[in-house]
Amino acid sequence: MATPKGKHLWTATVGEKGQIVIPKQARDIFGIKPGDVLLLFGDEELGIAIPPKNAFDSLFNVAFQEKDDEEK
């Protein structure tokens, strides 16, 4: 089965302290550096998703803009 372009699949093992190591190839592709904070979304039926860290810039801007507009 061929992997579609731009799609990736990795595995990570959970250590005794509940930590996982993000594979180097994934860190390189998504620009994840030591000290970065990642958000994890969880759905008990669908699983856990870790979206790219830059995916939240526009979401935060919209959320804070709406809040600013309400206060005026």
Image: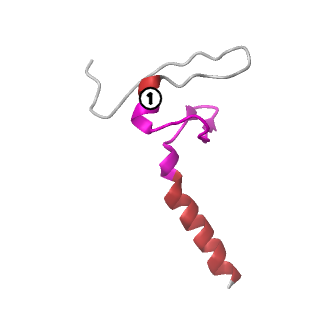
Where, quadrant-wise, is the N terminus in this rendering?
top left
Could you tell me residue 17's position as x and y percent?
74, 19
* Colouring method of the image: secondary structure
- Please identify the quarter of the rendering in which residue 37 is found: top right
Kind of element beneath mark 1: helix
Could you tell me residue 60's position as x and y percent?
58, 60
Q: Residues within 10 Å of mark 1 (few under 14, many from 20)?
A: few
Residue that protrudes farthest toward the bottom in the picture = 72
Q: From what the image shows, is residue 55 above or below residue 35?
A: below
Q: From what the image shows, is residue 28 above or below residue 54?
A: above
Q: From what the image shows, is residue 29 above or below residue 72?
A: above
* Amino acid of disc 1: Ala
The mark tally for this picture is: 1
Position of 32 compared to 37: left or right? left
Residue that protrudes farthest toward the front in the picture = 34
Where, quadrant-wise, is the C terminus in this rendering?
bottom right
Position of 29 compared to 41: left or right? left
Residue 30 within the segment the image draws in magenta: yes
Residue 3 within the segment the image draws in magenta: no
Residue that appears at 60% across and 73% down:
66
Residue that protrudes farthest toward the right in the picture = 17
Span highlighted in magenta in the image: 27-55
Residue that appears at 62% across and 36% down:
43
Residue that appears at 50% across and 36% down:
32
On the image, numbered disc 1 is attached to which residue? 26
Could you tell me residue 9's position as x and y percent?
41, 24
Residue that appears at 60% across and 31% down:
45
Query: In the image shown, does 42 or 53 lie closer to the viewer?
Result: 53
Position of 44 compared to 22: left or right? right
- Please identify the quarter of the rendering in which residue 67 is found: bottom right
